[in-house]
């Protein structure tokens, strides 16, 4: 009977320690996400309209694309590098106020 009591106490302590560990991990993740969201400021990277033009597709077809050019300026101490055009999202605000987004290189 003493072995069962000892096993029950050890199991209870292990379960409690596991539950506390999981709670601390989830708390840490939620605090980290909240801080990351609060740290973003819209004036950290600004864009200035540089101009627009047209471009044809790579195969020389008659399809023409309107190209808008912006110069981006980084006002932070961090360096940013765009690895591929798939990691960039474009946003357009409609007259209704609704935001539309799409990946770079595809029509919005």
Image (tube, rainbow, N blue to C red):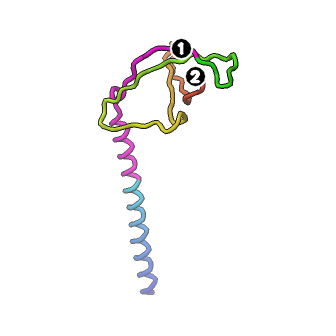
Give residue 85's position: percent from left, percent from top: 53, 33
**Label disc, if present, on residue 108 of the rendered structure:** 2
Q: Which residues are magenta?
A: 26-54
As for residue 46 lying within the magenta part, the answer is: yes
Location of residue 15 (image quadrant)? bottom left
On the image, numbered disc 1 is attached to which residue? 53
Q: What SS does tag 1 mark?
A: strand
Determine crowd level at label 1: few under 14, some 14-19, many 20+ residues with C-alpha closer than 10 A.
few
Location of residue 104 (image quadrant)? top right
Foreground of the two, 20 or 93: 93
Name the residue located 36 percent from the left edge and 46 percent from the top edge. Answer: 32
Give residue 38's position: percent from left, percent from top: 34, 36
> Reading the chain from its start, which is encountered first: label 2 or label 1?
1
Give how far apart the Cα atoms at labels 2 and 1 are: 17 Å
Relative placement, left or right, of 79 versus 102 is left
Foreground of the two, 71 or 23: 71
């Amino acid at each position: 009977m003493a072995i069962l009591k000892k096993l029950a106490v050890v199991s209870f302590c292990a379960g409690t320690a596991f539950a506390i560990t999981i709670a601390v991990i989830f708390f840490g993740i939620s605090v980290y996400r909240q801080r990351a969201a609060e740290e973003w400021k819209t004036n950290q990277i600004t864009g200035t309209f540089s101009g627009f033009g047209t471009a044809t597709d790579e195969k020389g077809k008659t399809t023409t694309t309107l190209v808008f050019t912006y110069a981006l300026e980084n006002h932070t101490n961090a360096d940013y590098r765009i690895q591929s055009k798939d990691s960039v999202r474009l946003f357009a605000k409609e007259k209704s106020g609704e935001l539309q987004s799409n990946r770079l290189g595809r029509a919005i």
